[in-house]
Image: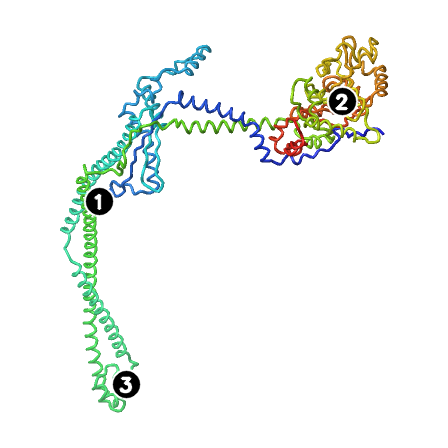
Amino acid sequence: MKISSNPPAHDMPYNNDQDDIVDISTILNIIWRRKYFICLISLVFILIGGYYAYRVAVPKYRSTTVVILDTKVSAFTDIQSVVGSITGDSEEVNTEVEILRSRRLIGKVVDRLDLISDPEFNGALRPVGYVDQTKIWVKDMLGMDTSGPQHPEDIRQKIVRDRVIRSLLENVTIRNVSSSLVFQITVETQNALKSANIADTIADLYILDQLTVKFEETEKATAWLTERVAQLQLELEAAEGAASDFSSSIDLVSVEVLRAQEVQLKELRERISETDAQVTSDNDRIATALSADTDPATLATLFNDAQLLTLQPRVENDAEAKTQFDARVTFLTANLQEATLRRSSQLTALRASEAKLTEQLGSQSEDLIELQQLRREAEAVRLLYEYFLGRLKEISAQQGTQQADSRVLSPAVIPNAPASPNKPILLIMSAFLGGLIGIGLVLMHESRQNVFRSARELEQKFGLSVLGQIPMAPSRNRSRILQYMTTNTTSALAEGYRDLRTSITMSNLDAPPQVLLNTSSVPGEGKTTNSVGIAHYMTNGNQKVLLMEGDIRRRTLDSYFPDMSKQHGVVSVMNGDADLDDVLHFDPQSNVWVLPGGESNKMNAADVFASEDFKDLLVALRERFDVIVIDCPPVLAVPDARILSKLVDMTLFTIKWDGTSEYQVEESLRVFHTSGQRISGFILGQIDMRRLQSYGKYGQYSAYTNYSGEYYSN
């Protein structure tokens, strides 16, 4: 029965959902594994931070002056409408903070303390540093102008002053204490006394500026009020003169006289109305009396005369009575006409009086209204004049008594020690930053390592079984490795090869593989050591085992078997220079027969293995040995492995633990696949037992966990 093989890597589905899960324990294990590297990076940063703190950084001293806004300051007189004070609103507090930060105020500080002559703030007075010298040198080499623009002396001085102001502002911090009217003026310079002096000067000039502003505003208010009072005085004099002149030009009347005339006019109008009504009534009676159609009874009733009332019943029957009645009517009518004429004349006179009184009343009312208006205007001007005159007196009394809205709550204290650099904090931050960078480098390096640290990961990636997991040999000396295998039969290395032997044997119980080929991706992956170990532990079943050197270019078996002939081997047999029995070497220590490669200067290795003579040799070796292990060169180096894999029963592929990259394995499997060959299984070798435990989740998938130490004797 042929040995079944798994499909190639690129034909196998690979589920890497677990790769997206962040394992905190794995990250912590990675950090712990590289703790010395991280500590080294932290130490480097501590040294850099210490050098900066103790040798490079310039000590700076910090001093603070505390100022409070005194909103309860009161003047001797109330002139808030002219020169107001601070009320403590948040807008005004923020405004005061900006005033403290203003270039105008800081400029006054620069001028008072002559900071233009201080090299700390005036960079032009400092020696040219190496960086600036380098810049000047580079510009000179490039032919660039290093002198800069030329300005007149006054402009140059202004530019220098602006630079000093900007430099001082960078070292001044103004802070308003939360929910208060307190300001902290903090200055940081290279000199302790200078820091305190500048902080106090800022506070003093700030308070002085408040007084100056108030004094200037008072002067402006005084000048304006003086001018306004003089103007109002002239207006008052003009208004009172106008009222007096008008009063002299008219018949002075009073409101009481006008009211009496109005009553008189009302009564006159009532009399006119009554007289007019009487005249109208009399005219109607006269017309009725003179009418021929009026009967005696009506006339008697119209005049209501007793004689007529007596004669009226006899008028119709008595002619004398009628004559007397008519005479009496004529007499009464004449009297009524005479009375009516008198009333008409009286009515005309009354109306003339009414017209005259109305005209007189209207004229005097207009004069009175105009006079009152002139007097009101004069009074209004007088009130305004008196108000501004009072304000002027208040301002005059206030001059020289103004108080600032702020006062110094706590003057600056000369610091005893520099505030920066804070050397302990700087060293701690350097160590912390170094640790973070070290951890970042470790995690970045770890994320870029596409290597394999567990059999499970390898099987999931490529879909091929890991037949054995071999620990790292305790010695780098190859001759001692074989000695270690034979003497330490209960070691983890021995158990690893026994487990590999079991996997190889159990791969096909009906027809166990006889010819085994072991290869790898690149040199240095422990392939030859695994071939020697497989061959040695295959002899435990009393089998006759042959270890054939397939890497005839490098001939690495010589270092494992120093007593073996180095001149003759497979190549000599193929050339006919030696017999097979002459080149076979038996190693009593490992109980393994060894067929070396021999010198191959005249023959190409690929041609040797592809020849029919080699196939015949392999057939002959199958008849003489129970197991044949061929140590083949790396796949990515030469094509020998692809040629030999067609002639063997099982192809093993050695992968170095935490060393062989994923790309190398994929490329090797691709090469095998293009040649129509298959790999039977992997050997994960050179496992570092100590490092394995520090790789977190990889350690639990290994056959060599902590509890295995009870069974192994290393």
As measured in the structure, the alpha-carbon distance from the residue carrying label 1 to the one carrying label 2 is: 114 Å
Instruction: Classify mark 3: helix, strand or loop.
Output: helix
State if disc 3 and disc 2 touch (CB < 8 Å): no
Image coordinates of residue 33 in percent, x first then y, are 57, 28
Q: Quadrant of residue 680?
A: top right
Residue 78's disc is: 1
Q: Secondary structure at mark 1?
A: loop
Q: Mark 1 or mark 3, which is nearer to you?
A: 1
Amino acid type assigned to the residue bearing label 2 in the image: Ala
Give me the residue at 20% from left, 86% from top. Answer: 307
Left or right: 668, with 98 as reference point: right
Give the mark nearest the N terminus, 2 or 3.
3
* Disc nearer the start of the sequence (1/3): 1
Disc 3 marks a residue whose amino acid type is Ala
Place of residue 82 in the rendered image (x, y in percent of width and height, measured from the top left): 24, 41
Q: Which residue is mark 2?
A: 535
Q: CA distance from mark 1 to mark 3?
A: 95 Å
Residue closer to the observer: 366 or 652: 652
Residue 340, image x, y percentages: 21, 73
Q: Quadrant of residue 545?
A: top right
Relative image position of residue 392 (x, y in whole percent): 19, 41
The residue that label 3 is drawn on is: 297
- Depth order, front residue of 402/551: 551
